Image: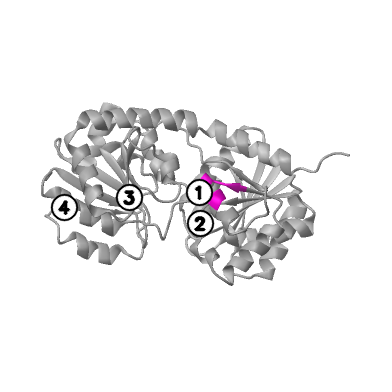
């Protein structure tokens, strides 16, 4: 089977990281894959990462939100590659790629990776519904995303299939030597309790709430340290907020192409997402679980689907600074609890969110999308 994947990329975020796992895994399962990347901003970095994994990649400028030239290019790519399925990711690829699939007479599948707030209001909701009318089958990456699509009638009834992200847990847990080396790299003392957040520095990811909660927690647990990996437009404001905390309590690490050494060096991973952003899945939380690290997350979007409260982490109400601080203090003071939650998290990542399960369910959707012989 040949599958042509289409995505607009401005850099490497959650959906791009997912594709960096999905496409090589599909190839290992015997699928011939090609990726068409509509590039904007730093999107070429994503295309290069795909090539580094030996994925066949084609690039074009994304252009404006409505770009007839991109539709023509994708149609040409589909006619040249002759895929059994054309698979689009995110709304820009849906808008252009689903039309191209129709023009090239190729069965198609769409993946929706989040709950875009703009789709709740006109005219964007009308655009989303129009896309849904030309999209035969849709993969939602969580039950939360499925409910979002169905509640707003962005997809036709019965056309959405849930396929959670998957992750290969191999290589995520640290050996004692790797952990010691990582903590030295990030200048952590033996008795420091390190909390990491690995997310873009954008409104809604909850960095501001986490800094406020950390300030409260430090009053009773001064061993806490926060390491912030990522970049984005809120960096300057967050830096000002952090300067109000004790010296050395917070470090900004900028973008890290591989967060594994940081996750392995830390003791807790935090995901304090705000309701207005939501989380389509929460891949970084799954990575933390694979590394045997307990997770503190807000009850937002799909995070409660990934993080089992009281089993693999602590889930707190969104925006609740006090409960977030209490969770940080509790985990800082109880290494046994951190170990139990971390071990259960790795088992959950291994069994519930395996790459094998993700690939099997994706292939089932492809088979369903193929025309039936009469």
> Which one is in front in this view, the residue at disc 3 or the one at disc 4?
3
Q: Give x and y (percent) for residue 37.
A: 59, 56
Along the line of sight, the residue nearer the viewer: 148 or 244: 148
Is residue 3 something that shows in the picture?
yes
Q: Which residue is mark 1?
A: 144
Residues rendered magenta in the picture = 139-147
Q: Give x and y (percent) for residue 3.
A: 68, 45
For the N terminus, the quadrant is top right
> Which one is in front in this view, the residue at disc 3 or the one at disc 2?
3
Along the line of sight, the residue nearer the viewer: 154 or 348: 154
Q: Is label 4 in a helix, a strand or a loop?
A: helix
Q: Distance from label 3 to label 4 (Cα)?
A: 17 Å
Which of the numbered marks, if any, corresponds to residue 317? 3
Which of the numbered marks, if any, corresponds to residue 216? 4
Q: Distance from label 3 to label 2 (Cα)?
A: 19 Å
Q: Earlier in the sequence, mark 1 or mark 4?
A: 1
Q: Are marks 2 and 1 in contact (CB under 8 Å)?
A: yes
Q: Which residue is mark 2?
A: 115
């Amino acid at each position: 089977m040949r599958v042509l994947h289409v995505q607009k990329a401005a850099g490497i975020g959650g959906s791009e990281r997912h594709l960096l796992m999905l496409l090589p895994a599909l190839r290992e399962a015997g699928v011939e894959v090609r990726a068409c990347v509509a590039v904007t901003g730093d999107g070429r970095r994503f295309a290069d990462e795909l090539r580094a994994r030996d994925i066949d990649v084609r690039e074009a400028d994304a252009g404006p939100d409505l770009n007839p030239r991109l539709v023509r290019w994708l149609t040409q790519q589909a006619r040249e590659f002759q895929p059994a399925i054309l698979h689009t990711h995110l709304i820009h690829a849906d808008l252009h790629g689903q039309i191209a699939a129709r023009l090239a007479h190729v069965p198609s599948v769409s993946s929706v990776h989040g709950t875009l707030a703009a789709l709740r209001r006109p005219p964007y909701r009308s655009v989303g519904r129009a896309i849904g009318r030309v999209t035969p089958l849709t993969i939602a990456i969580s039950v939360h995303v499925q409910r979002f699509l169905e509640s707003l009638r962005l997809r036709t009834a019965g056309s959405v299939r849930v396929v959670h992200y998957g992750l290969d847990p191999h290589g995520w847990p640290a050996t004692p030597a790797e952990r010691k080396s990582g903590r030295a790299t990030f200048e952590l003392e033996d008795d420091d309790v390190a909390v990491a957040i690995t997310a873009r520095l954008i409104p809604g990811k909850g960095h501001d709430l986490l800094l406020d909660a950390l300030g409260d927690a430090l009053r009773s647990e001064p061993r806490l340290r926060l390491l912030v990996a990522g970049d984005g437009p809120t960096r300057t404001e967050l830096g000002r907020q952090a300067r109000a905390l004790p010296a050395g309590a917070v470090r900004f690490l900028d973008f890290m192409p591989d967060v594994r050494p940081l996750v392995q060096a830390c003791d807790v991973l935090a995901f304090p997402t705000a309701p207005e952003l939501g989380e389509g899945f929460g891949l970084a939380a799954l990575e933390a679980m694979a590394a045997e690290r307990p997770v503190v997350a807000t009850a937002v979007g799909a995070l409660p689907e990934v993080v089992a409260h009281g089993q693999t982490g602590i889930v707190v109400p969104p925006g609740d600074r006090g409960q977030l601080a209490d969770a940080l203090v509790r985990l800082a003071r109880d290494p046994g609890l951190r170990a139990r939650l971390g071990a259960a998290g790795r088992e959950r990542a291994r069994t519930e969110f395996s790459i094998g399960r993700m690939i099997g369910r994706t292939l089932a959707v492809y088979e369903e999308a193929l025309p039936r012989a009469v």
